[in-house]
Image (tube, rainbow, N blue to C red):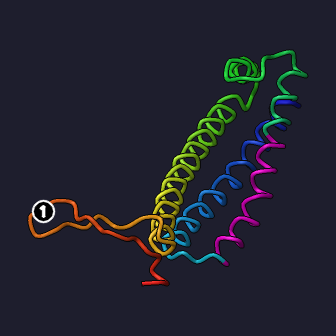
Amino acid sequence: MNDTALLDLFTNDIGTAEQLLELIDNEFQALTERDLPRLDSLLSEKQPLLALLQQHGNDRSRLLQTAGLSADREGLTALASQSSVGEQLLQRSEELSALLQRCQEANLRNGRLIRANQASVGSVLGILRGGETPGLYDSRGSAARIAQQRPLSQA
């Protein structure tokens, strides 16, 4: 009974993880285009998928523990060795793990893009506020000395 329930959870989560990966890729596109309304929409679509994956992960752990097994790969392997659908369980588990790894890598990529955009926007704001000046050079290639720095709005 636990083995078929686990198989169903793996199968459902594979579909959910595929949807999540697609949303993360769409998020990258929206970040590249700096499309904030689309980013907000994508975030609201991602949250229920993440909650569902978390809930199913907890359910899988509980099913393994109910069977007296550890809630890890070792426990799943032990259950699979006694199950008629054991090979499918292991295949689905591997497939889900690979998809979740791809989701994590895509999410890290998006995070790097967000940090780069934040740094760029921060630099531009610093220039506009007068706190920073871009690196300027004189005719000899040395850093130019600017006697008085003023915000761009006061220049």
Q: Residue at x 86, y 29 (%)?
A: 63
Where is residue 153 shown, x and y percent of the image?
49, 84
Q: Quadrant of residue 23?
A: bottom right
Q: Residue at x 32, y 69 (%)?
A: 147
Q: Quadrant of residue 25?
A: bottom right
Q: Residue at x 51, y 56 (%)?
A: 115
As drawn, 109 above or below 76: below
Prevalent SS, magenta region: helix
Query: Is 13 inside the magenta-drawn segment?
Result: no
Q: Quadrant of the N terminus?
A: top right
Q: Residue at x 67, y 23 (%)?
A: 73
As drawn, 78 above or below 104: above
4, 107: nearer the viewer: 107
Span shown in magenta: 37-56
Residue type at tag 1: Gly
Residue tagged 1: 141
